[in-house]
C-alpha cells in the first residue's frame, strides 16, 4: 500500500519536519546546567560541532563555493574595568580585615588573571587562535573536493585586531592543508559594508521596545542580588556595604568568571563564587538583552537591518561566483553583533522564533548556541553537471541547520533560487 | 696560511664597509633609479644576494627580525584634500590650464582609489613581505626547514599586522612544520613602537636645526613650477595657494604611486627629475633630524632602547636554552631608522647637518624603504660556547662599530657587551618617574 509521494507533497512534508525541528531548538535550564559555562552567553568558548557526520548532498551535486562568516575567537574582556572594580573592592576589604578566606582566594585569582590581561583588552586569546585553526581544519576535511583545488580565496576582516588575527590563523591552517591556495587577506575601512554591520543605520524605535526593555531590566537587576555573594566574600557584610556596591561587584565578578573560560592556560576558575541558579538568572538577562538589541523579538526595533548590506554582499558575491563558474571561497571575519543579526536575516531556525514572553525568551532563542566565541555561519553551495540548479546548505557553528521560512524538497539543502528570493524580498 | 690571509682580507673588507663613506648616493644613481628618490615610499630594493658562508662548523640557530610594514597608502588623505580642494575651486573659476584640468581628473581617480584606505597595506606590500620570508627560508635552510617555533609580534596598526600575516603565511607554505604564533597587542607595544614614556634628553641645538630644515623644505619644495603648469595665471593665485604645501602634497602623491603599481598611474610629470630628487632630499634630511640622527639634534632614538633590550634579552634566553627559533617583529619606519642607528649599522650613521649634501652620506631608501628591515642571524658550533651573529640591513650584510676577526660575523659576547654598555650609559629615565618627582616638588 505504499503510496507514491509527489514533489509537492514532499515539499510540504519537509516543511512540516522543518517546523518540528524548529521547536527542538528550545533551551532548557537543565541543558544550561549541564554545561554551566553556557551562561557566559557571548563569552561561551566555542564548543565545536555536535554532529560529526553531515548529510550527503543529493546525487551528482558537488560543492563549488563556500561563503563563511565568522566571529573572532575567544578573547580577553574588551575592557579590564571589571578586574579593576573587583580587585579594588576586595583589596580594600582585605585592608579593613573583613575579607573571608574565600574572598582572599578570589582576590589572589583576580590578581593573577589581571596580570595576564594587562594591556590585552579585547585581544584574541591563544584559545581563540586555536579555535579558528580548528574550524579551518574541519572545513577542509569536510569539503576536500573543493578545498584541495588551487583556489583563489578572498578573506576580509573587520578592522579590529582580534578579528584580523582570527583571519590570519584560519587562513594559515587552510594554507598548510593546501599550499596551492592563493589567499588574499585584507582588513580595511574600504570593505566595512562587506564585513560589519552599519551602525549609521538607525531604525525607528518601536513603541513595544520600551516595554520589553523595562521587563528585561527588571530580570537583569533581579538576577543581580548580591546577598549570598557578599556573605561568602566578606566577614562583615554591613561594613562591606559601606564602600561596596554589591550589585556592581556581582556584575564585575560574573564577567571575569565567565571570560576566564577563554584563557584556559591560566588554570584559574572563579565560576564557583556563584550558584548555578545565580548564573542562570544573570544569563537570562544578558540573553534577553542581546535579542532585544538585535531586534529578534516580535515588535521590537529591527536593529538587524544594520546588517542588511552584508547580507546583500553575500548574495551578490554568490551570484557572481555562480555566474563565473569558478570554484572559490569567501571568508569574512567579524563580531557577535554581526553574526546574530545575520543569522536572523538568513532565516536560521536558531535565531527565529523569538516570542514576546520576555522572562522565558531563553526557551526560544539562546545566544550561546548562536554567538559563542568563534561563532560562524557557513553557506556551502553545490552544483550538478548539466544542470542550472544550485543547492545551498547552511551550517551554524558547523552544525547543519534549516531555514523554516523557505520550503525545500531536499533539506537541509535549499534551492539557491528560493533562498535568494527570500533574502532579497523578505 | 690561506685561512689567515682570508681573515686579513675579510677584516680589511670589514673596516672598509664599516665606513659610512660607502653609503654615498650620487645624483647619477638617483637619476638612473628615480624610484629610489621616493625615500620611505620606496619599493623594497632587492638585496644583492651575496651571503658570506658561515665559518666552518657554524650553523644558524636563531633569527631575530624587525621589519617595517610593506608598501601602503598614504596615512591620511590630507594631500588629496588640499590639492583637489584648491584645484576644484580653480576649475569652477576658470583658472586651470588644460593640463591642470587633466591633472585634477587624474588626482580624483587616485583619491577615489585611496578612499577609506588611508594607511592600508597595498597588494605590493603583501608581496614584499612574502618575498622577504621566502628569501629567509632559502638563505638559511639549515634552520628554516626544521620544525622550529616562530614567534611574531606586530604593531597594532593594521598594515603591520597584515605584513606579519603575509610573512608568516609564506613561511608556513614553505615549511608546514613551523609552529607559528602571531599577536598584535598593546601588551607588547613598549618595544614594538617608539616608547613614549621614555624621557628624551633636551638638546639646545635641536631648535635651530628645525629652523634650518624648515627653510630647506620651503626652498626645495617651493611649488613655483607646479603652479605654472596648473594655473593659467600663477600671479593671480599667489597668496590663495600655499606653494610649499601644494608641492609637498603633489610630491607625496607622486611618490605614493610607487606603492600602487597595479594602477599604472604616475604624477611624475608634475616634476622635473631634479625637482623630484629635491623632494627626496627634503625627506631624507627630515627623517635624519626627526629621529635624532643628525649631529646636534635631540636624541629621539632613546625611545627605541626598549627594542634593543628586547633583542638582547631574548637572544640571551635563546642561547641559554640551547634551542632554535625565529623571532619576528613588525612595525614602522620610525623604529627601523633609529634602531639601525643605535645598532650603528654603516648605512645609518652618516648623518650631517649639511642638508644640501646629506644624501652623499645618508640615504633613507637604503634604510627605510617599504618593508625595510634589520635581521640578526645567530650561529653556533658544536662543542663551543662561541656564538656568532651577522647583521643584515634590508637583507644585505652590513657592519656595526664592534671589533671582529670574522667580518661580517661578530662574536655575540662582544656584541652583547657593547650594546649592554650602551644601554647602561644611556641611563634611560621614564617620564612618569620624572613627572612624579616634579609633582612631589610642587607638593
Image (spheres, coloured by chain):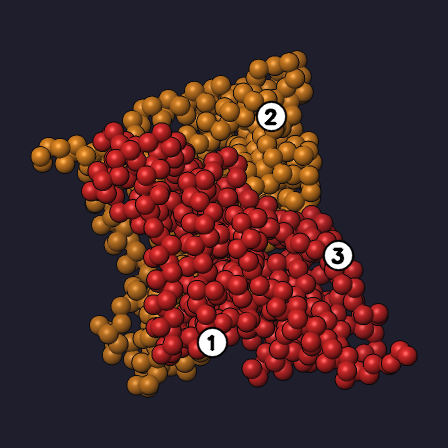
Chain colours: A red, B orange
Residue at numbered disc 1: A298
Q: Position of residue B300 (x, y in %)?
A: 31, 40
Q: Check residue A53 in the rendering and tell me which mark sits there, or answer none.
A: 3
- Locate the N terminus of chain A by quadrant: bottom right
Numbered disc in front, either 3 or 1: 1
Q: Position of residue A32 (x, y in %)?
A: 54, 52
Residue at numbered disc 2: B323
Q: Check residue B175 in the rendering and tell me which mark sits there, or answer none.
A: none
- The 10 Å Cα crowd at callout 3, few under 14, some 14 to 19, many 20 or more, is few
The answer for which chain carries disc 1 is A
Instruction: Say what secondary structure mark 1 lies in.
Output: loop
- Locate the C terminus of chain A by quadrant: bottom right
B178 sits left or right of A272 in the view: right
At 31% from the left and 50% from the top, the residue drawn is A247
Please, is residue A58 above or below residue A132 in the view? Answer: below
At 75% from the left and 56% from the top, the residue drawn is A53
Depth check: give the residue in front, A18 or A127: A18
Please, is residue B73 above or below residue A402 in the view? Answer: above
At 41% from the left and 40% from the top, the residue drawn is A273
Instruction: Say what secondary structure mark 2 lies in.
Output: loop
Instruction: Say what secondary structure mark 3 lies in.
Output: loop
Q: Position of residue A28 (x, y in %)?
A: 55, 58
At 47% from the left and 36% from the top, the residue drawn is A268
Amino acid at each position: 500500500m505504499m503510496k507514491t509521494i509527489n514533489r509537492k507533497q514532499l515539499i510540504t512534508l519537509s516543511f512540516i519536519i522543518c517546523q518540528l525541528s524548529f521547536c527542538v531548538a528550545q533551551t532548557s535550564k537543565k541543558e544550561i546546567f549541564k554545561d554551566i559555562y553556557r551562561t557566559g552567553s557571548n563569552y561561551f568558548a566555542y564548543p565545536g560541532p555536535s554532529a560529526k557526520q553531515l548529510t550527503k548532498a543529493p546525487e551528482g551535486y558537488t560543492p563549488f563555493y563556500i561563503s563563511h562568516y565568522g566571529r573572532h575567537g575567544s578573547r580577553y574582556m574588551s575592557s579590564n574595568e571589571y578586574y579593576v572594580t573587583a580587585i579594588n573592592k576586595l583589596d580594600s576589604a582585605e585592608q579593613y580585615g573583613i575579607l573571608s578566606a574565600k574572598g582572599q582566594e578570589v582576590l589572589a585569582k583576580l590578581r593573577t588573571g589581571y596580570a595576564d590581561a594587562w594591556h590585552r583588552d579585547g585581544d584574541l586569546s591563544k584559545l581563540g587562535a586555536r579555535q579558528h585553526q580548528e574550524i579551518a581544519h574541519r572545513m577542509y576535511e569536510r569539503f576536500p573536493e573543493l578545498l584541495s583545488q588551487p583556489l583563489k580565496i578572498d578573506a576580509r576582516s573587520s578592522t579590529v585586531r582580534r578579528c584580523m588575527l582570527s583571519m590570519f590563523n584560519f587562513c594559515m591552517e587552510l594554507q598548510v592543508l593546501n599550499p596551492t591556495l592563493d589567499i588574499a587577506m585584507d582588513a580595511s575601512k574600504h570593505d566595512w559594508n562587506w564585513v560589519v554591520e552599519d551602525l549609521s543605520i538607525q531604525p525607528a524605535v518601536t513603541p513595544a521596545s520600551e516595554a520589553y526593555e523595562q521587563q528585561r531590566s527588571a530580570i537583569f537587576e533581579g538576577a543581580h542580588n548580591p546577598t549570598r555573594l557578599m556573605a561568602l566574600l566578606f566577614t562583615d557584610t554591613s561594613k562591606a556595604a559601606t564602600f561596596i556596591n554589591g550589585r556592581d561587584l556581582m556584575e564585575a565578578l560574573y564577567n571575569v568568571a565567565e571570560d576566564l573560560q577563554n584563557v584556559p592556560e591560566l588554570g584559574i576558575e572563579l565560576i564557583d563564587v556563584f550558584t548555578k541558579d545565580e548564573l542562570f538568572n544573570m544569563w537570562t538577562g544578558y540573553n534577553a538583552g542581546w535579542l532585544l538589541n538585535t531586534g529578534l523579538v516580535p515588535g521590537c526595533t529591527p536593529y538587524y537591518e544594520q546588517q542588511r548590506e552584508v547580507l546583500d554582499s553575500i548574495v551578490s558575491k554568490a551570484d557572481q561566483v555562480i555566474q563565473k563558474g569558478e570554484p572559490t571561497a569567501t571568508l569574512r571575519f567579524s563580531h557577535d553583533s554581526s553574526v546574530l543579526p545575520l543569522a536572523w536575516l538568513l532565516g536560521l531556525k536558531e535565531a527565529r522564533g523569538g516570542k514576546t514572553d520576555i522572562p522565558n525568551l531563553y526557551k526560544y532563542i539562546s545566544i550561546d548556541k548562536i554567538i559563542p566565541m568563534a561563532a560562524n555561519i557557513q553557506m556551502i553551495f553545490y552544483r550538478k553537471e548539466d544542470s542550472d540548479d544550485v543547492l545551498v546548505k547552511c551550517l551554524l557553528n558547523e552544525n547543519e541547520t534549516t531555514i523554516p521560512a523557505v520550503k525545500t524538497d531536499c533539506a537541509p539543502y535549499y534551492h539557491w533560487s528560493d533562498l535568494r528570493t527570500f533574502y532579497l524580498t523578505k | 696560511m690561506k685561512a689567515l690571509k682570508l681573515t686579513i682580507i675579510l677584516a680589511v673588507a670589514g673596516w672598509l664597509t664599516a665606513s659610512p663613506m660607502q653609503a654615498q648616493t650620487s645624483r647619477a644613481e638617483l637619476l638612473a633609479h628615480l624610484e629610489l628618490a621616493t625615500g620611505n615610499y620606496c619599493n623594497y630594493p632587492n638585496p644583492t644576494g651575496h651571503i658570506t658562508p658561515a665559518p666552518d662548523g657554524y650553523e644558524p640557530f636563531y633569527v631575530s627580525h624587525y621589519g617595517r610594514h610593506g608598501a601602503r597608502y598614504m596615512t591620511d588623505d590630507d594631500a588629496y584634500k588640499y590639492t583637489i580642494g584648491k584645484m576644484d575651486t580653480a576649475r569652477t573659476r576658470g583658472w586651470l590650464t588644460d593640463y591642470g584640468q587633466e591633472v585634477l581628473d587624474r588626482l580624483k581617480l587616485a583619491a577615489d582609489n585611496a578612499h577609506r584606505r588611508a594607511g592600508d597595506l597595498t597588494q605590493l606590500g603583501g608581496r614584499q613581505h612574502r618575498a622577504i620570508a621566502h628569501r629567509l627560508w632559502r638563505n638559511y635552510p639549515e634552520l628554516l626547514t626544521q620544525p622550529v617555533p616562530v614567534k611574531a609580534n606586530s604593531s597594532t596598526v593594521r598594515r603591520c599586522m597584515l605584513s606579519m600575516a603575509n610573512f608568516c603565511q609564506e613561511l608556513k607554505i614553505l615549511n608546514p612544520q613551523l609552529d607559528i604564533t602571531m599577536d598584535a597587542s598593546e601588551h607588547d607595544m613598549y618595544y614594538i613602537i617608539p616608547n613614549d614614556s621614555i624621557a628624551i634628553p633636551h638638546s639646545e641645538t635641536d631648535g635651530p636645526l628645525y629652523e634650518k630644515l624648515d627653510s630647506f623644505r620651503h626652498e626645495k619644495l617651493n611649488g613655483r613650477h607646479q603652479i605654472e603648469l596648473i594655473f593659467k595665471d600663477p600671479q593671480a593665485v599667489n597668496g590663495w595657494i600655499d606653494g610649499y604645501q601644494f608641492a609637498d602634497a603633489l610630491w607625496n602623491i607622486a611618490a605614493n604611486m610607487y606603492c600602487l603599481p597595479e594602477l599604472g598611474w604616475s604624477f611624475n610629470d608634475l616634476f622635473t627629475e631634479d625637482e623630484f630628487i629635491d623632494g627626496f632630499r627634503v625627506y631624507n634630511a627630515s627623517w635624519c633630524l626627526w629621529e635624532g640622527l643628525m649631529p646636534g639634534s635631540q636624541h629621539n632614538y632613546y625611545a627605541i632602547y626598549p627594542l634593543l633590550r628586547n633583542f638582547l634579552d631574548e637572544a640571551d634566553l635563546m642561547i641559554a636554552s640551547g634551542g632554535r627559533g625565529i623571532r619576528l617583529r613588525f612595525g614602522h619606519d620610525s623604529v627601523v631608522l633609529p634602531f639601525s642607528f643605535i645598532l650603528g649599522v654603516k648605512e645609518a650613521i652618516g648623518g650631517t647637518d649639511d642638508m644640501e649634501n646629506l644624501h652623499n652620506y645618508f640615504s633613507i631608501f637604503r634604510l627605510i624603504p617599504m618593508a625595510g628591515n634589520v635581521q640578526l642571524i645567530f650561529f653556533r658550533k658544536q662543542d663551543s660556547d662561541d656564538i656568532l651573529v651577522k647583521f643584515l640591513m634590508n637583507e644585505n650584510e652590513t657592519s656595526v662599530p664592534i671589533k671582529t676577526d670574522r667580518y661580517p660575523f661578530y662574536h655575540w659576547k662582544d656584541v652583547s657587551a657593547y650594546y649592554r654598555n650602551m644601554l647602561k650609559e644611556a641611563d634611560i629615565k621614564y617620564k612618569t618617574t620624572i613627572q612624579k618627582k616634579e609633582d612631589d616638588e610642587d607638593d
